[in-house]
Image (spheres, rainbow, N blue to C red):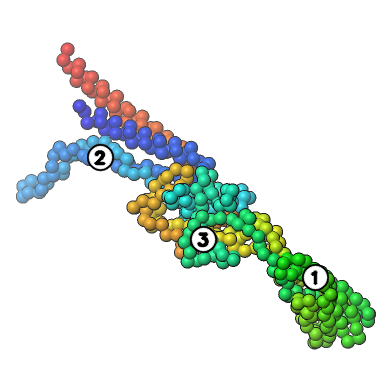
Amino acid sequence: MLRSLYSGISGLRSHQTMLDVTGNNIANVNTAGFKGSAVQFQDTLSQLTQGAGGPQAGLGGTNPAQVGLGVQVAGISTNFAQGSSQATGRATDMMISGDGFFVTRQGNETLYSRAGAFDVDAAGRLVTPDGSIVQGLPAVNGVVNEGGRIGDLTLPMNTVAGAIATSTATIGGNLPSDAAVGTQLVRDIEAFDAAGRSRTLTLTFTRSAAGWDVAGADGTGATGAGSLTFANGLQTGGGNVTVGGVTVQLDSITGYAKLSTLAVSGQDGRSAGTFAGFSVGKDGTVIGSFTNGASEAVGRLSLATFANSAGLEKAGGSTYRATFNSGAATIGAPGADGRGTVSSGTLEMSNVDLSQEFTNLIVAQRGFQANARIITTSDEVLQELTNLKR
């Protein structure tokens, strides 16, 4: 049979593979985190019809004569270029800007993904749409265990942030030096005990001939007193007042004329609170927010990098698994050791370029048609051969 017939068949098969890969790229044009693939062709073995001849004294050398036997698919490579970002506003949607993969666990298998469309399951764990559990480092008392082993990243949905007793409060601003003697300014501070019970600590500032007298009282009957003196608007005497175990810092108060801006700056106590939500920093740290205004780290996402990302094997569900040629995963914090950073509220879109894919579609179609023409032409030649004997 004619060699061209089988060359045409190999061309049909190879271009059919190109059509399959291109069709898959186009089908996943809106798949978050999808990375497009491309087909590389190479020729197959060639049949040697005449060997090379070396040059001689009276005769020049001759080149080998070879007839190719068709084409084959050399490989299908994955393009890991960064995809564009799409804002979603969901805290559980995350995008990697740069190199790296999210680490997920599916049963006993560890998989890797660029798709960050996560949700929270009933156990408070971050999961992918197909139920794989996102991996990371837990935090204990707001501190991430850097040397710990990664595990399921769980949000403290039923955790209570404990109450903290108020020990220090701060009042700042300005007391008017031109106020009449006997003028009073009253400021209330909400303070808490160790059980989270709230009480009001009242400070009364009374203008005196020498400056301002300060009297404090709270709902438990505790009292405290002090005085403030000023020179050219700056405090020269006074300082802190202690009422019921709470030290009220007054040293930042000034005493300029015609300006009354006395205000409570804050206090370090709080009541108990429940988990209200979370946010994710660029370093992958998950910050939990509580109803009492407290916030603390509850964990940190882990990212994996590979010596050869193109060697990863697609495992379905927008995930990859490590292979011998990808190398082992190097897992660490986002933003460290060349890993990308994490953005919350955005998703990485597919990096498929539709204009390129439609061009590839045309190329594959024309290549398929040309190879089909080789087969029909070879068939016509065979028909002529069979017609020689009539």
- Please tell me which residue is depicted at 67% across the width and 58% down the height of the picture: 274
* Sequence order check, earlier mark of 3 and 1: 3
Q: Of the residues shown, which amino acid type is indicated by label 1? A: Ile
The residue at which mark 1 appears reads as 189
Query: Which residue of the protein is positioned furthest toward the left in this rendering?
Result: 57
Which quarter of the rendering shows the N terminus? Answer: top left
C-alpha gap between disc 3 and disc 1: 39 Å
Q: Residue at x 37, y 33 (%)?
A: 16
**Residue at image point 41% right, 57% down:** 329
Callout 3: SS:
strand
Q: Nearer the viewer, residue 227 or 36?
A: 227
Q: Amino acid at mark 2?
A: Thr
Could you tell me residue 207's position as x and y percent?
A: 90, 81
**Within 10 Å of the Cα at label 2, are there few (<14), some (14-19), or many (20+) other Cα atoms?**
some
What residue is at 23 percent from the left and 23 percent from the top?
A: 381
Q: Position of residue 228 (x, y in %)?
A: 83, 83
Circle 2 residue = 44
Instruction: Please identify the quarter of the rendering in which residue 278 is found.
Output: bottom right
